[in-house]
Image: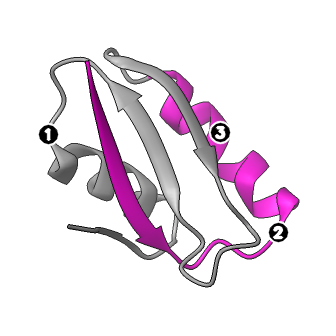
């Protein structure tokens, strides 16, 4: 298992709900959350065997910015 961390532009709970079904359907995503109080609106994903790029693509396909943080 690894923890992947991303900067996003998700601003509110409604937007989190828009992303939720897309992240839940990805095989390998064990758990995820978005810290709406953080200035980078950090998305943390506990994953097994996923590339950061695949998470970025999914979030971006829903219409939000998503970039892996170092």
State the SS at label 1: loop
Q: How is the image coloured?
A: one colour
Residue drawn at 67 percent across, 60 percent down: 35
- In-image side of 54 versus 62 (left or right): left
- Circle 2 crowding by C-alpha within 10 Å: few under 14, some 14–19, many from 20: few
Which image quarter holds the C terminus? bottom left
Q: Which label sits on residue 12?
A: 2
Give the residue at mark 3. 20
* The stretch drawn in magenta includes residue 51: no
Q: How many marks?
A: 3
State the SS at label 3: helix
The part of the image, by quadrant, that contains residue 4 is top left
* The stretch drawn in magenta includes residue 19: yes
Give the residue at mark 1. 51
Q: Magenta stretch? A: 1-25
Task: List x then y, in percent, for residue 20.
Answer: 65, 39
Task: List x then y, in percent, for residue 30.
Answer: 45, 17
Q: Disc 1 versus disc 2: distance between alpha carbons?
A: 26 Å
- In-image side of 48 versus 11 (left or right): left
């Amino acid at each position: 298992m690894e923890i992947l961390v991303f900067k996003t532009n998700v601003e509110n709970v409604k937007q989190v709900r828009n992303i939720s079904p897309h992240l839940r359907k990805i095989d390998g995503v064990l758990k995820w959350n978005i810290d709406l109080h953080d200035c980078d609106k950090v998305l943390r994903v506990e994953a097994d065997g996923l590339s950061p790029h695949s998470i970025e693509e999914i979030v971006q396909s829903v219409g939000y910015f998503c970039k892996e943080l170092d």
